[in-house]
Image (tube, rainbow, N blue to C red):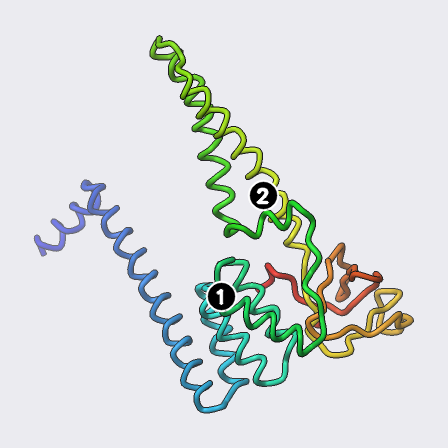
Amino acid sequence: MSDLRFAICGLRFCPWLRHSLVLAEFFLAVNILNAATNDFFARGIDLSRAGQFPEAAAAFENAAQRQPAAGTLVNLGLAEWQRGRAGAAIVAWEQARWIDPFEPRAAANLKFARQVAQVDEPPLKWFEQESTWLPPNAWVWLAGASLWLAVGALVLPGIFRRRKAGWQQTLAALAFMVFLASLTANVGVVSRTQIGFVLKKNAPLRLTPTRAGEIISTLTAGEPARQLRARGNFLFIRTTGESGWIESEDFRRLTDD
């Protein structure tokens, strides 16, 4: 009984012990999440080897939802392609490149898939093209680091009562240039979140956001477009040649789960 009271008092009067337990619970939760993700990924690999591509795609999608990774999305795209869903495959490979712009398998698969499906890459503006050079989060860190470096190079000599050296002014100018470039890239990242792809073959593009609306044209699976707004179960999108309403289940953006 005394040991139990001692343990309770230790938790009450030793904050570091409480914090240690909370930290231990956090790492336990992370390990459980990683284990579940790895289980889904391994199951997806086994199902793909067995030729059970719909089940493999479901397993890879579960793994990607728990812990997004470029490799998982590449395998998800392969499973979707093998089951005949070109639009979903292109979305998965584009999402892999969103996470890791240097993923070579995603780039090669996209090139092949677009040749077969006869669809184009999404047209990007210059600042959107710039944003593809690094992962989205990297641009945020680069903007913050370059800004503080420029401010530090200009302000710190005055704080320490030292004369500014030429190299400090040059460093501040370069850091400020990097900051401006990263700002435009961050704008490009936000703008690219509007980009999505048609999932369904011959998906109808309608004049009004209703199923009774007049069909303007039909879209190809994997065709790129920009989502401009939503109304109910319909999305207003703009393709390279026209605009109209499409059902939300037939379209997925880069940043959609």
Label 1–label 2 contact, CB within 8 A: no
Residue found at the very far bottom of the displayed protein:
50
Q: Mark 2: which amino acid? A: Asn
**Could you tell me residue 51's position as x and y percent?**
49, 90
- Sequence order check: which comes first, mark 1 or mark 2? 1
Q: Is residue 165 left or right of residue 144?
A: left
The residue that disc 1 covers is: 104
Q: Quadrant of the C terminus?
A: bottom right
Please tell me which residue lies in front, 254 or 175. 175
Residue 160, by quadrant, is: top left
Residue 101 to residue 148: above or below: below
Answer few, some or many: residues within 10 Å of disc 2's Cα (few below 14, many 20 plus, some between 14 and 19): many
Disc 1 on helix, strand or loop?
A: helix
Residue denoted by label 2: 186
Residue drawn at x 52%, y 64% is 96
Identity of the residue drawn at 49% across and 29% down = 174
Q: Is residue 209 left or right of residue 15?
A: right
- Give the percent coordinates (x, y) of residue 198: 71, 70
In the image as oriented, which residue stretches furthest toward the front?
166
Considering the numbered disc 2 on the image, is that residue within a helix, a strand or a loop? helix
Q: Residue at x 22, y 41 (%)?
A: 15
Taking 175 as reference, is 127 above or below it?
A: below
Amino acid type shown at disc 1: Pro
The disc at residue 153 is none
What residue sits 51% from the left and 84% below the top?
55
